[in-house]
Amino acid sequence: MARLPVYLRALNALADAGTATCSSEHLASVAGVNSAKLRKDLSHLGSYGTRGVGYDVEYLRYQIAREIGVTQDWPVVIVGIGNLGQALASFSGFRSRGFRVVALLDADPDRHDQVVAGVEVRPFDDLEGVVRDQGVAIGVIATPAVAAQDVADRMVGCGITSILNFAPAVLAVPKGVDVRKVDLSIELQILAYHQQRKAGLDSTTTAPTRKVGSA
Amino acid sequence: MARLPVYLRALNALADAGTATCSSEHLASVAGVNSAKLRKDLSHLGSYGTRGVGYDVEYLRYQIAREIGVTQDWPVVIVGIGNLGQALASFSGFRSRGFRVVALLDADPDRHDQVVAGVEVRPFDDLEGVVRDQGVAIGVIATPAVAAQDVADRMVGCGITSILNFAPAVLAVPKGVDVRKVDLSIELQILAYHQQRKAGLDSTTTAPTRKVGSA
DNA sequence: AGGAGTTTGTGAACGGGAGAACAAAACGAG
DNA sequence: CTCGTTTTGTTCTCCCGTTCACAAACTCCT
C-alpha cells in the first residue's frame, strides 16, 4: 500500500517523542488517516498489535520498514543534474531512508566532473556500466520532458524496473516496470483550479454557454 | 478533476505538432488514459467536441486552461530556500503555466539578500506584507519538517488558502484551505516496496510468523 | 478469580470512480 | 434526400476502497 511510508514516518515521530506504545486511534491521528483504515492496513500485513493495549512502536516500526524494504540498501541513479537533479542529489531524506545515490548522470558535457553532494557528475553513457556494477534497480529522471522517454528506454534496457519520473511527460514502459510520476506544475495547477473555484464564484461563470466553431 | 492538467499538456503537445483536430481516442492515448474516462471528464465541463469529428485542439485547449485557471496570473510565494526551494524557484515550468514567483522567504539570515532565479531571498517575517501587497493565494513550503506546521499556520493566518507542501510532515489546516503534499522519499519508498515484491519473492517471506513482545 | 474497560481485527454496508456498451448527432457519398 | 460511417455524450454495471459496527481478546482493579 501507498500509505505504509506515512505510517512509518508517524511511527518515527512517535519513537522520537519517546512513546513506547500507541493505539490505532493515536497513530491514525498522527498519520492523518482514519483509524479503521489504519487497522485494516496493518492487519493486512500481519497481526501485530495487542488487543486492549495497542501497538509497540518500535516493533511495528521495524515490521513496516521491513515490509517496505527500507531495511535494506537501495542504490539509486539520478539522470539529469539540472536544478531539480541537484536538489534531489542533495536531499538528505533519501540517504536516511535507505536510498544511496550511486551516480549522477547528465548528457551535457559542461556538467561533467562537477561534484554535487559529494558525487561526481558523469556522462549519461555511463548508465549501463553503473547499473551493472552497482546492481541499481531504481532510477530517477530529472531531465527536460523531451529527453525523458529516451532516458526511460535506456534505463529499462539495462535492467532498471522502478522509475521515479520528474519530467512532465507520459512515459511508455513495458509491463513489469513501475513508474511513479511527480509533476510539480500539475500540483500547482490543481491548487489553482480549486483556488479559482473558491474565489471565482463571482467572476467567470463555471457553466459556459454552448459555443460552436474553432478558434 | 486532477487529470485536467494532463489533458492540457497533451493538447499542447498536439498543438505543437500541428494537429488541428483530434478524437478522444487519440488524445487519450497521448495523455495515457482511457478514452471513455477522457470523454466523461471533458463532458463534465461542457459539451465541447463535435460528434463524428472530434475536438478542436486549440479551442479545447483554451477551454481547459480557463477551467483550470491558468489563463490568469497566479502570484506564488516560496518559503524555505534550501536546495529544493532553489530548484523550485528556478523551475521554468511554473512561469510558463501562469505562476509567478513573487517572493522567496527563508528564516535563516545567512540566506537573505541572496538572489535565486532573479528574485531576492527575504526574511520569513516579510510573509504578511508580501501576501497583502501582491494578493498571494498560493504558498509553497520547502522547509524542513519541523518548521512546516508553523509556516503553514502563518500562511493561513494571512489569507493563503492553497498550500503546496514539500516538507515530510502532515499539516493541520482549517477547513477551506487546500493542501497538496509532495513527498519525495515516500515516492521512492513506494517504488522500493514494489521492487522488493518483484525481486524478493525468494529472500524474506512476506508472511512472517506471529511474534510476541517488544524489541 | 471475576468483571469492567479498552483496543484490535474483521465482517458488512456504503460510496464513488472506472470501463464497457449504447444511443444521439454530425458529416460525407450517392 | 437518404443512408452509412464516425465519434461524442451518457447510462449502466462492476469493482475496489473506505467506513461503520461489533465480536474477540487482553489488561487492570477489586
Image (cartoon, coloured by chain):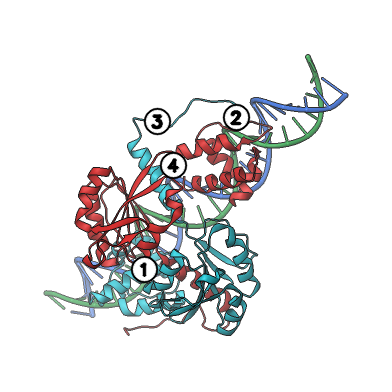
Chain colours: A cyan, B red, C blue, D green
Measure the C-alpha gap from mark 2 to mark 1: 50 Å
| Quarter of the image where one finds residue B119 | bottom left
- According to the picture, the residue beneath numbered tag 1 turns out to be A7
User: Residue C8: percent from the left, percent from the top?
Assistant: 35, 70
Measure the C-alpha gap from mark 4 to mark 1: 35 Å
What kind of element bears circle 2?
A: loop
**Badges 2 and 1, same chain:** yes
Q: Residue drawn 28% across and 42% down?
A: B135
What kind of element bears circle 4?
A: loop
- What amino acid is at disc 2? Ser
Which callout, 3 or 2, points to the residue nearer the camera?
Answer: 2
Chain of the residue displaying label 4: B
Chain of the residue displaying label 2: A
Left or right of A152 in this view: B126:
left
* Mark nearer the N terminus (2 vs 1): 1
- What amino acid is at disc 4? Val
Q: Decide: few, some or many residues near mark 2? Use Cα within 10 Å; few <14, some 14-19, many ≥20.
A: few
- According to the picture, the residue beneath numbered tag 3 turns out to be A204
What kind of element bears circle 1?
A: helix
Measure the C-alpha gap from mark 1 to mark 3: 42 Å
* Mark nearer the N terminus (3 vs 2): 3
For residue A214, the mark is: 2
Nearer to me, B145 or B70: B70
Q: Is residue A124 above or below residue D3?
A: below
- What amino acid is at disc 1? Tyr
Measure the C-alpha gap from mark 2 to mark 4: 20 Å
For residue B70, the mark is: 4
